[in-house]
Amino acid sequence: MSSIDPVVVIDGKGHLLGRLASTVAKQLLNGQKIVVVRCEALNISGEFFRAKPQCDGEKDEQGISTRKTGGHRTFLELQMANLGFWDIVKYHAYLRKMTRYNPTRGGPFHFRAPSRIFYKAVRGMIPHKTARGTAAMERLKVFEGVPPPYDKKKRVVVPQALRVLRLRPGRKYCTVGRLSHEVGWKYQDVVARLEERRKVKSSAYYERKKAARRQLVHAQKSAVVSEKTKSQLAQYGF
């Protein structure tokens, strides 16, 4: 994305949220229009975990007693179990932040949808209260899934933000879609169902494209062109 293209469509699947947001923010400030699809498949480093209540006197899957904590493991016991639950804990702490007067009127507003989570991450890296920052944010579009017309456009990736290239093999990670679903996003199953339909159509289109390409190659090999036709084509540079 060194030059300015009309619109760059980025497939968010497998990208780290913060690294992709920083790259997108820089390009937006440079004047590039960007569309990010499949935001629900963005990754966050660190294991997803939410402590679920256990019955008194029982032990959880790690063999730690939950009797003294009223069904919940203590913070120290979670550390002893070496469970990375920071993503969900940090996001719940973020959801609790509000103003002391009227939070429904003045904010802050906490988004649950994956696309809005990514949008707010990009907004935090841009001076969005200035005219330059406002214009930059207007160049960004974010979606869950791949809605029309972007399902028929070429999608690209950002190598410096890909999880497989940036995280050490074996590192824990989670998806933004699962995090959003746990904190109140209601459309995870709807997006998954629409994505299955899109993949079926895309696969059928790809098979037709391969068949047409094979027919073209076969026609080029078996075609008989006269010398007169070749000379006429050569005059026009073919």
Image: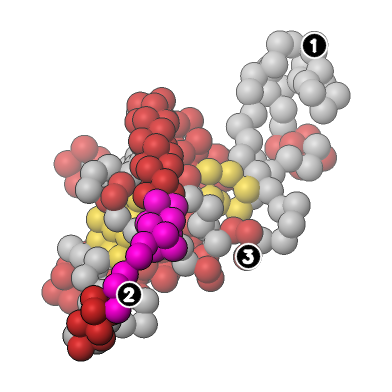
Is residue 60 found inside the magenta-colored segment of the image? no
Residue found at x 53% / y 43% = 175
Amino acid type shown at disc 1: Gly
Q: Is residue 170 visible?
A: yes
Q: In the rendered view, tell whether residue 106 sits above or below residue 129.
A: above
Instruction: For the residues labelled 3 and 1, say whether their Cβ atoms are less than 8 Å apart.
Output: no
Image quarter where the C terminus lies is bottom left
Residue found at x 72% / y 61% = 168
Distance from the alpha carbon under mark 3 to that under mark 1: 44 Å
- Tell which of 124 and 174 is nearer to you: 174
In terms of secondary structure, what is the magenta stretch mainly? Answer: helix
Image quarter where the N terminus lies is bottom left
Q: In the rendered view, tell whether residue 218 sits above or below residue 100.
A: below
Q: In what element is the residue under mark 2?
A: helix
The picture places residue 98, in percent across and down from the top left corner, at 33, 44
Report which residue position mark 1 lands on: 57
Report which residue position mark 2 lands on: 27
Q: Earlier in the sequence, mark 3 or mark 2?
A: 2
Instruction: Tell me where residue 31 sits by quadrant.
Output: bottom left
Label tally: 3
Q: In the rendered view, tell whether residue 183 sits above or below residue 14.
A: above
Q: Which portion, as a residue range, is magenta?
A: 214-227
Distance from the alpha carbon under mark 3 to that under mark 2: 21 Å
Q: In what element is the residue under mark 1?
A: loop
- In the figure, is residue 74 to the left or right of 14? right
Is residue 220 found inside the magenta-colored segment of the image? yes
Q: How crowded is the residue under tag 3: few (<14 C-alpha within 10 Å), some, or many (20+)?
A: few
- Tell which of 182 and 102 is nearer to you: 182
Report which residue position mark 3 lands on: 165
Q: How crowded is the residue under tag 1: few (<14 C-alpha within 10 Å), some, or many (20+)?
A: few
